[in-house]
Amino acid sequence: MSTLPTPSTPSVTAPDAAVRTVLITGTSSGIGLAAAIAAARAGWRTVATLRDTGRADALRKAAAEEGVTLDIRQLDVVDEESVAAAVNGVIADYGRLDAVVNNAGAGHVGTLELESVADVREVMEVNFFGVLNVSKAALPHLRATGGRLITVTSVGGVIGQPFNEAYCAAKFAVEGYMESLAPVAGAVGVDVSVIEPGAVATEFVNNIGLDIEARIAAAGPYADALRHYVERTVGQFLDGAQTPAGAAEAVMEALTADRPAFRIQTSQWAREFTGTKLADQDGSAVVGMTGTWVS
């Protein structure tokens, strides 16, 4: 009978070992930036990582305005060597890792007939396998400190949304993986939580890089449905989007609560929206609701 290898437990001794250390991915903007500032303000040694450190100006400016110190480092979640270098660097410099916030990800709008399977794989690589890369590298160190593994997913990880098939599939995968991992990690002292934001200001329009009119013009038989979807969704982001700082409060809840919940929504709207799915045993309520978005 085969046995699982026993990973080594890293040392957590260091001159300043009592200071809690958190590593956050995807901190150039949005929730990641806000969470990094909030964690530093709360007294955490905060390692704020991003794929391109040339995009760290907003992060540095926010830290200066708040009077907090961040350790800004490069980390590309889809590059295992980059992930290992970042995590190992934190341990080498600080001797411990108490929490990880998987925030890095990429939005995507499309539908199966109009895009390639390779496009879908790319979305999964960033939003799902990137989370696994960071979590796997961090877990031995989180075991050593009785730490926390926190992942920002989406309400799209609970309710599938039109023209978001690939994005929602990746977020569904993250939710399923972490829900399955939670009791296993808990058995070795690591708390696992997922954070479920709804619309957050600037993310949809600015981060997806979607040329709306060009995409609709190229949508063929899906053009009308896509236009309805875009009008509804852009309106939601412009009129009712939550601030990144508001969403980051849920990250801090997972980071600091004595017994953090597994699933934490970032707003009352997100709680009500995900509640539709969690109470919908035959799926008719969700499909009926999202059907109105495209007609």
Image (tube, helix red, strand yellow):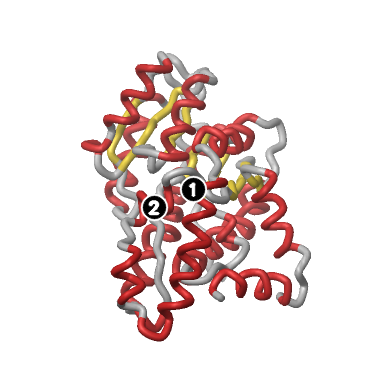
Task: Residue at the far left: name it.
Answer: 54
N-terminal-most mark, 2 or 1: 2
Q: Quadrant of the N terminus?
A: bottom right
Q: Residue at x 36, y 51 (%)?
A: 207
Q: Amino acid at mark 1?
A: Leu
Locate residue 264: give its quadrant: top right
Q: Nearer the viewer, residue 114 or 41?
A: 114
- Judging by the rendered image, the residue that carries numbered circle 1 is 238
Q: Is residue 176 above or below residue 246?
A: below
Q: Amino acid at mark 2?
A: Val
Rendered location of residue 255, percent (x, y): 59, 33
Q: Secondary structure at mark 1?
A: helix
Q: Nearer the viewer, residue 83 or 277?
A: 277
Judged left or right of residue 47, residue 243 is right
Q: Secondary structure at mark 2?
A: helix
Locate residue 111: give its quadrant: bottom left
Question: Is residue 216 at all visible to an observer of this figure?
Answer: yes
Rendered location of residue 215, percent (x, y): 33, 70
Q: Is residue 175 above or below residue 193?
A: below
Q: Quadrant of the C terminus?
A: bottom right
* Disc 2 to disc 1: CB gap under 8 Å: yes
Mark 2 vs mark 1, foreground winner is: 1
- Judging by the rendered image, the residue that carries numbered circle 2 is 205
Other residues around mark 1 within 10 Å, as few (<14) / some (14–19) / many (≥20): some
Judged left or right of residue 208, residue 175 is right
Residue 258: which numbered mark, if any? none
Q: Is residue 65 above or below residue 262?
A: above
